[in-house]
Image (cartoon, rainbow, N blue to C red):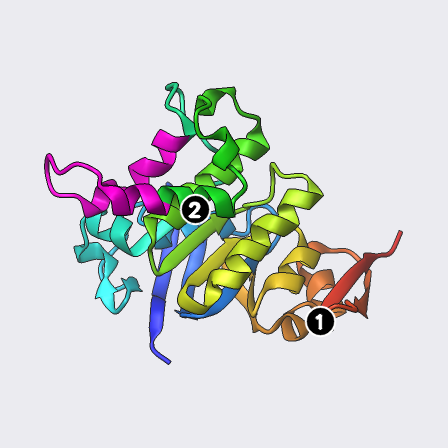
Amino acid sequence: MDSTVKVQGLSFSYGKDEILKDINLSFERGKFYSIIGPNGSGKTTLLKNIGKTFNVPKNNIFLLNEDIYSMNNKEVAKTLAVVPQNIAIEYDFTTYEVVLMSRTPFKKRFQDYNSEDFDRVQRAMKLTDTWELKDKPITSLSGGEQQRVIAARALCQDTPIVLLDEPTSHLDIQHQISFLNIFKELKTKLTVIAVMHDLNLASLYSDEIILLSKGSVLATGSPSKVINRENIKNVYGIEVDIIRNTSNGSPYILIKI
């Protein structure tokens, strides 16, 4: 299967601090990927490079076989959507308006929204359980509610690639599960790439896991291949027991104290 996202020989530094070291990865349509690793391992930096938050060098990242270096921001926005870790919206747009803005990349200059756009907004907001919030200012919502609205915006953008940066960090357990279920169910037509801190959620929902350590890829593959005692000890420095989740047989971590 052709890769929807390909990372090829990517290294990245903040000033003199090298964060990513020669990363080589391929991501396919129809799969949910989780990037895991301790703080400072380069997870979010990798995701931001894929999303062209930074100026990416030529021949390092390809979206749908096109070098992201040659793509303008509008072209990137038609290809991937992002649910960021931190949401910074300071203006009192309604939640409906925030989600509707995701359709802007698909509009020509001065072209207005149409019934198809409005239908997409409604579907996305109902999927994320935010339709009842449609008339509320985004700034009046809790962190968890804002996170679900931003998820609706990403779904409404209707791109083949979705990036999730710690998507459940502001959600209670009920909404964590419902949030991840949405993207798990939609993954047949998407490539979902998520940065995850909760290793058990990553194990439960992922088709493949990428384990980063000090800016390098330590392991990739199925949850059963990547999440094991040795890898967790080497990367996180803790002793764990591994049992099998009764729902799908994925590894489940029990921390030894």
Residue type at tag 2: Ala
Q: Is mark 1 on a helix, strand or loop?
A: loop
Task: Specify few, some or many for label 1: CA neighbours under 10 Å numbering under 14, 14-19, or 20 or more.
Answer: few
Q: Is residue 105 visible?
A: yes
Q: Where is residue 213 in the image (x, y as percent from the top left)?
A: 57, 58
**Can you say which quadrant of the picture contains the N terminus?**
bottom left
Labelled disc at residue 248: 1
Q: 82 or 185, which lies in front?
A: 185
Horizontal placement of 13 versus 109: left or right?
right
Q: Residue at x 23, y 40 (%)?
A: 104
As measured in the structure, the alpha-carbon distance from the residue carrying label 1 to the one carrying label 2 is 28 Å
Q: What element carries label 2?
A: helix
Q: Position of residue 122 (x, y in %)?
A: 40, 42
Q: 178 or 15, which lies in front?
A: 178
Labelled disc at residue 124: 2
Q: Which contiguous range is marked in magenta?
A: 96-120
Labelled disc at residue 67: none
Q: Which residue is drawn at 79% across and 69% down?
A: 246
Q: Is residue 215 visible?
A: no
